[in-house]
Amino acid sequence: MNREWKVLVIMMALTVPSTLTLAGWQESTANYHRTNSGNSTATGISEQKAIIIAQQHFKGRVLAINQIGHTYRIKILSDQGAVQTILINARDGSVIVAP
C-alpha cells in the first residue's frame, strides 16, 4: 500500500468515529464505538475487561468493540497508525487471535 493510501486510511479511521451518533458511543470509558447491545455476557467477561486484555497484547487507542456470540472483536489503532483486530473469548477472556 503506498503512502497516500496509508494516510487516507488513517485519516478516515480518525474522522469516521466523530461522525457517528452518540447513541453508539460510551464516552466515559475510552471513546470507543460499541456495536453490541450489552456490556457483558451472562456468564463471561465485560467489554472493559476484554479491552484491558486486548491492550496487553497491542498498545493503542480502541476504535471499536463488538460481540458476536461468545467472541469480542476489538479494533485498536497504534501510535504508528496500524490498525489491529484482536479476538477475545467473551466467556473466559482468553485471546483467540492477537498480533
Image (cartoon, grey):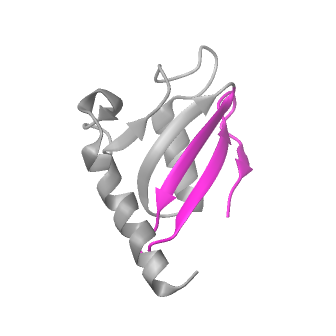
Q: Looking at the image, is 76 positioned above or below residue 37?
A: below
Q: Is residue 15 left or right of residue 65?
A: left
Q: Looking at the image, is 57 positioned above or below residue 5?
A: above
Q: Is residue 73 magenta?
A: yes
Residue toward you, 94 or 35? 35
Residue at (30, 57) in percent of width and height: 15
Residue at (44, 72) in percent of width and height: 81
Q: Position of residue 52 (x, y in %)?
A: 50, 47
Q: Is residue 48 left or right of residue 87?
A: left
Q: In the image, which residues are magenta? A: 70-99
Q: Looking at the image, is 43 positioned above or below residue 97?
A: above
Q: Residue furthest bottom?
A: 3
Q: Is residue 25 left or right of residue 91?
A: left
Q: Is residue 92 magenta?
A: yes
Identify the image quadrant of residue 93.
top right
Identify the image quadrant of residue 88.
top right
Q: Position of residue 33 (x, y in %)?
A: 39, 40
Q: Quadrant of the N terminus?
A: bottom right
Is residue 14 visible to us here? yes
Residue toward you, 74 or 21? 21
Q: Residue furthest top?
A: 42
Residue at (51, 29) in percent of width and height: 46
Identify the image quadrant of residue 58.
bottom right
Q: Position of residue 67 (x, y in %)?
A: 58, 31
Is residue 80 visible to us here? no
Q: Quadrant of the C terminus?
A: bottom right
Residue at (49, 33) in percent of width and height: 47
